[in-house]
Image (tube, rainbow, N blue to C red):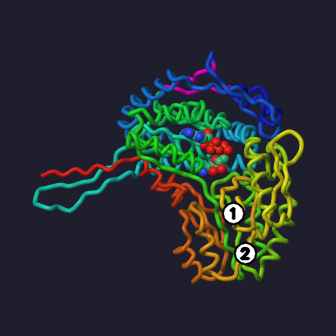
């Protein structure tokens, strides 16, 4: 890895060689198939990413089987020490890792730095929680008997992560499996490989035994199909879209592989007449356009009480038009490009469909000319329910604001879709807060806040948004099996 110049002078010089990491070895492209990794802000080629061959995958699987036995037998405090050291190396190398994440994902560097901090916190939290994977002792059924429950690591994990959080997604996948005592074959997104590889290097340098973690890339469905058909894999963790999640679950079923599925969302935001409008608007615009809206818990469907709807739309529009769009490496950039041209075109199609069906376009509504996959931050209001965007996850820089009159009506609309990941509500009425907590169909609910993810809280959805959680004690538990032992 080049360290010739300071990061700020020539960030590209610090973008690492893209390799596979298998059984403790860094594997270069050689004569493997490969793909270009592009900077979504400029279109320039950042590197050439090797695709794992079947032989590479077999080596990764064999290493995971062997590595599991080694890692499982380490004391929890030994595993904890490795993870804590990896977290501290991540912080030391933070500027290189976050710069790589911005180069390959396009997100503003400030957001990458915050993600780096959160990701190292996640590893550290898992390091601690792994030491608390207690079982329990049951009361006796007869004198002299003993009955107890123990928790054990489930076995080798296959993990698949998307590109929207190049550091956060790997931290969750690696943190949960390694803290539980599992080995892991990890496929990060091909769009954002470098941040994940730099994090794997932190693991290796922290003393993770060879083979416990492998990182592979390739054609996503080819890799996942191969790994999930192996009897070595005992658990799958996937973050991505609902259709891909369903396909992977079907594959996992054949080997009865346990699953944690973090799938898409279409988060409703209910703004009641007693909300603090200015404060809500500041928070809403920042949350909506974080990572250009490419966030599974991004607020998307705003329902604002009719008495404040017009003021809310006006305030939202004014704030959106002040967003600074540009290359994420520029410290002033507030919103970068979309990850690839496919995503930009998908957003265009959703917005065009909404406008054609009668939605009001308040601002934005088109791609930005020039290099990079930029799309203007966009606001639609009074959006008919039969538009695609009110039914399909937008995953981009678009917000929709409709109005409502009463609680039952808005609750019905909030819960109408098959998604159930995040939901938000803004109100000062405590009785209503209780009702919202009970009635909103979502795995995570933010009241007067968009902050719904910290390392110690379970992150996950219900309905078609998936099942299981990452982070929190639930995230660790998902990588463990329960064993009951009865002794007379
Ligand atoms: P996509 O479905 O092609 O890819 C999304 C992610 O899933 C990528 O990282 C990809 O590598 C991975 N993937 C796809 N097929 C896979 C397979 N068979 N096995 C393993 N991994 C596979 O879509 P895209 O255009 O890149 O992203 C847009 C959609 O993806 C969005 O609409 C959103 O629903 C979903 N997405 C969700 C999240 C999330 O955090 N839940 C993150 C990123 C993307």
* Residue at 76% over, 58% down: 398
Identify the residue under disc 1. Answer: 390
Left or right relative to 92: residue 9: right
Residue 374 lies in the magenta stretch:
no
Indicate which quadrant contains ligand 1.
top right
Instruction: Report how many numbered discs are placed on residues in the image.
Output: 2
Left or right relative to 23: residue 1: right
Q: Is residue 190 above or below residue 476?
A: above
Identify the residue under disc 2. Answer: 304
Left or right relative to 323: residue 163: left
Label 1 – label 2 distance at C-alpha: 15 Å
Q: Position of residue 420 (x, y in %)?
A: 56, 62
Query: Of helix, strand and loop, which one carries label 2?
Result: strand
Assess disc 2: are there few (<14), some (14-19) or many (≥20) residues with their C-alpha within 10 Å of its C-alpha: many
Q: Are marks 1 and 2 in contact (CB under 8 Å)?
A: no
* Residue at 69% over, 53% down: 395
Q: Is residue 111 above or below residue 414?
A: above
Q: Is mark 1 within 8 Å of ligand 1?
A: no
Q: Is residue 226 above or below residue 150?
A: above
* Residue at 73% over, 65% down: 284
**Residue extending furthest toward the left:** 143
Which circle, 1 or 2, is nearer the viewer?
A: 1
Assess disc 1: are there few (<14), some (14-19) or many (≥20) residues with their C-alpha within 10 Å of its C-alpha: some
Which region shows up in magenta? 17-29
Q: Nearer the viewer, residue 164 or 202?
A: 164
């Amino acid at each position: 890895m080049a360290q010739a110049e300071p990061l700020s002078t020539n960030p590209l010089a610090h973008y690492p060689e893209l390799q596979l990491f298998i059984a403790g070895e860094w594997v270069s492209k050689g004569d493997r198939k490969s793909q270009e990794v592009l900077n979504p802000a400029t279109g320039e080629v950042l590197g050439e990413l090797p695709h794992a061959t079947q032989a590479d995958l077999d080596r990764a699987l064999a290493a995971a089987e062997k590595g599991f036995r080694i890692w499982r037998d380490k004391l929890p405090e030994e595993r904890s020490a490795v993870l804590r050291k990896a977290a501290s190396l991540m912080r030391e190398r933070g500027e290189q890792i976050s710069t790589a994440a911005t180069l390959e994902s396009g997100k503003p560097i400030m957001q990458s730095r915050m993600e780096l901090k959160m990701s190292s916190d996640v590893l550290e939290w898992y390091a601690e929680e792994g030491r608390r994977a207690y079982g329990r002792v049951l009361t006796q059924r007869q004198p002299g008997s003993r009955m107890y429950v123990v928790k054990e690591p489930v076995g080798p994990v296959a993990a698949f992560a998307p590109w929207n959080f190049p550091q956060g997604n790997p931290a969750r996948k690696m943190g949960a499996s390694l803290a539980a005592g599992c080995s892991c074959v990890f496929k990060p997104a091909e769009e954002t490989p470098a941040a994940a590889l730099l994090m794997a290097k932190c693991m290796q340098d922290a003393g993770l035994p060879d083979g416990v973690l492998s990182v592979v890339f390739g054609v996503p469905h080819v890799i996942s199909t191969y790994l999930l058909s192996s009897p070595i894999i005992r658990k799958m963790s996937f973050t991505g879209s609902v259709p891909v999640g369903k396909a992977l679950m079907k594959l996992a079923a054949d080997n009865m592989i346990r699953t944690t599925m973090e799938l898409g969302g279409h988060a409703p935001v209910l703004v009641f007449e007693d909300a603090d409008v200015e404060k809500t608007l500041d928070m809403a615009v920042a949350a909506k356009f974080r990572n250009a809206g490419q966030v599974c818990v991004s607020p998307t469907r705003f329902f604002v009480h009719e008495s404040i709807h017009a003021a809310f739309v006006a305030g939202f529009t004014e704030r959106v038009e002040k967003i600074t769009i540009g290359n994420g490496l520029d410290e002033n950039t507030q919103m970068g490009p979309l990850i690839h041209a496919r995503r930009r075109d998908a957003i265009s199609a959703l917005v065009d469909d909404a406008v054609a069906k009668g939605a009001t376009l308040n601002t934005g509504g088109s791609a930005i000319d020039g290099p990079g996959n930029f799309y203007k931050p966009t606001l639609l209001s009074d959006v008919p329910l039969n538009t695609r965007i009110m039914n399909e996850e937008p995953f981009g820089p678009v917000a929709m604001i409709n109005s409502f009159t009463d609680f039952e009506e808005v609750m019905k609309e909030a819960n109408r879709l098959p998604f159930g990941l995040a939901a938000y509500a803004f109100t000062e009425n405590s009785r209503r807060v209780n009702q919202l907590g009970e009635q909103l169909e979502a795995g995570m609910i933010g009241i007067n806040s968009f902050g719904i993810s910290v390392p110690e809280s379970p992150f996950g959805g219900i309905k078609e948004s998936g099942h299981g959680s990452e982070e929190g004690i639930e995230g660790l538990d998902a990588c463990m099996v329960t064993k009951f032992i009865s002794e007379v």
